Every structure is written in C-alpha cells, then in structure tokens.
Amino acid sequence: MPRGLIERLEEGVVLGDGGYLLELEKRGYVRAGPFTPEVSLTHPEALAQLHREFLLAGAEVLQALTFYASEDKLATVGLAGKVDELNRAAVGVARSVANEGDVLVAGNLSLTWAYDPADSASADRVRALFDRQLEVQMEAGIDMVIGETFTWMGEALLAAERALKTGLPVVITMSFEKDPRSYEGDSPAGCARKLTDAGVDVVGVNCLRNPEGTLPLVREMRDAVDGFVACQPVAYRTPAGQPDFTALPEFPFALEPLQLDRQTMARYAVEARGMGVNYIGSCCGSVAAHVREMARALGKVPPEEAEWRLDYERPMSAFEYYRHGE
C-alpha cells in the first residue's frame, strides 16, 4: 500500500505527471476537437505506455485518463453508454502501471460543459455526472481525486462537494483564461479561500496558462491560504496579451513550435518550490522529458550513473565531438 497523498505532502513536494490528451492525439490515439478519452478502451496499451513514461520520469502521481469522461461530454461522440466502462478501464490502466512503482493513482473529474448558473437544475445534473464517474473510479481503486480545469467557481465547488464524499484526499484546481478570474469574478485568492473553506485538501491552478502566466496566480493562492497548494501549467509559449494557449490560432493543430524546452519546465519547478507550492505538476504539452527534468531539478531522481567512457580527445559521439558536456 503506497503512502497517501497527505503523508507525502507533509514530507515535502510531490511531483505530478504531465499532459495526456494532446500527446495521445499527436501519437494518433485521440481525435483533436472533441479530445474525448476513449483510448482507454480502444488502445489501452498506448495509454499504459504514456503512464509508464511519466512513472519512469519521476512522477509520483498518475492521473487516470477520465478527463472529459462524463456522460454529457461522451454523448457528443456517441459514447454516452460507455461512461462506466471507460472510467473503469482508465483507472485500471493507471493502476496497472502504478503497481510498477511507488506512485499514487488519481481519479479525475473535469469541467462538464453542463454547468449553468442561470439554470437551477444544472447543479443537480453536474452532481449526477460527477457521482457516476466517482462511483466507478472508487470501485476500480483510486488513491485520491483531482478535479481540474474549472472556470466556473460554482462547478469547482460541486466537484469538491462530490469528491469529498469519497473520503479520499481531494485536489481541486482552477483554470484562468485571459482574465485571471473565475467566470463569477473570483480572484485566484478568492477561489483558493472558497475551496479551502469547503474542505478541499489541495487547491491550485492548472492548464491554459504556461508557467510564466500561472505562477503569479498561484502566488496569490499561496498567500491566501495556509493549506497545500498545487500548480500544473501547460508547456507552451503564448504571446503577450493572450496567456490562454487554447485561444491561439495554433490550437490544436500547430502547437509543436510553441512547446517549451525541458530546462524551462525545470526552472519553473524550482521556482514553484521556492514559492511554497506543495504539488508541482504540469499539463498539456508536458511530456516525459519535461517531467524528468523537473524531477531532476527537484532532487526526485538521481543523475544518470550508467557507465560511459566519455573522452573528448577521442570522441565517439557528436556530444563528445562538440564538447557539449563541458
């Protein structure tokens, strides 16, 4: 039985994994546009491989690919009847890989696109969507719950309400578009306080913005609450004045030139730790190379120590020939 999330956070920084849907789309297993996660049913081996890459890179939490795995969202691609099967399969794939190391499996909830504060019935609909996912995820065996990518404070609080009923540790993170406020007008600090008051174990920011656009908002949260804080930015460059990468014309088919290098993500991880961030992860665009460099920067994995007779005077690789290691 692996140590739980709270125990790990009390000991120090916990490193999360990276992005799934956009990376799997690049590999040919997810359809761009709807970005629904049926890969756990159609190509579970591909999902397992990406989980394994993050595990080997040093991630201490693997998120089950149940993002967008709620009934209303899946119905848009004809998969409404696959909710239970898909959630069960996604947790099972994550668990099979997590058993290869000392890592946790997180069940995942995301925005449903069904929440409407002007419709009093929508809150109960969202509750039902979340409850259905959580019931299956709990049966399949998760260690914690991550609710993410909420722009409505109200929907984030509904996710918190339902996730807390599981009795497992709960992480809820907000996403901020061009205006760094929830759709209701809450500042990052205000969001953090409301979620903490609701009983959430870890509050934070994820997706849409890169480290440069995310860290100032996380700092506001860190200053506003005494509990644990999470940060999971994307690994894409964005122009001044438009921090939300999904609003760019390059989304989703021309993002490759915008991907950040691994050293930038490593520097982000160190800066986040220095700010007092407890759960340091990454989101869209972040692949195993980014997570590995973050793990090294945080001291989570040792430097490579395999034998290599490095000899700059008698080079046997371009690395030696051009003296890149000096």
Image (cartoon, rainbow, N blue to C red):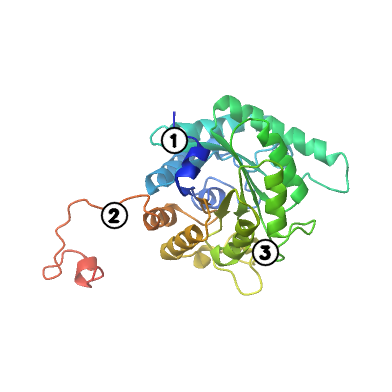
**Amino acid type of the residue that numbered disc 1 sits on in the rendered structure:** Ala
Residue in the image at 60% along x and 59% along y: 218
Circle 1/circle 2 CB separation < 8 Å: no
Q: Secondary structure at mark 2?
A: loop
Residue in the image at 48% along x and 50% along y: 27
Query: Around disc 3, counting alpha carbons within 10 Å, would you say few (fewer than 14), some (14 to 19), or many (20 or more)?
Result: some
**Amino acid type of the residue that numbered disc 2 sits on in the rendered structure:** Pro
Mark before the other along the chain sequence, 1 or 2 = 1
**Residue 5, percent across and down?**
51, 39
**Residue 169, percent across and down?**
58, 37
Mark before the other along the chain sequence, 3 or 1 = 1
Q: Secondary structure at mark 1?
A: helix
Circle 2/circle 3 CB separation < 8 Å: no
Task: Tell which tag, 3 or 1, sits nearer the viewer.
Answer: 1
Q: Residue furthest front?
A: 226
Identify the residue position indicated by label 1 in the image.
98
Q: Quadrant of residue 170?
A: top right
Residue in the image at 70% along x and 40% along y: 159
Label 3 to label 1: alpha-carbon separation = 34 Å
**Amino acid type of the residue that numbered disc 3 sits on in the rendered structure:** Ala
Identify the residue position indicated by label 3 in the image.
247
Q: Which mark is residue 303?
A: 2
Q: Which mark is residue 18?
A: none
Q: Residue furthest top?
A: 139
Task: Tell which tag, 1 or 2, sits nearer the viewer.
Answer: 2
Q: Residue furthest left?
A: 314
Who is closer to the viewer here, 164 or 207? Answer: 164
Residue in the image at 45% along x and 65% along y: 264
Query: Around disc 2, counting alpha carbons within 10 Å, would you say few (fewer than 14), some (14 to 19), or many (20 or more)?
Result: few
Who is closer to the viewer here, 114 or 9? Answer: 9
**Residue 225, percent across and down?**
64, 53
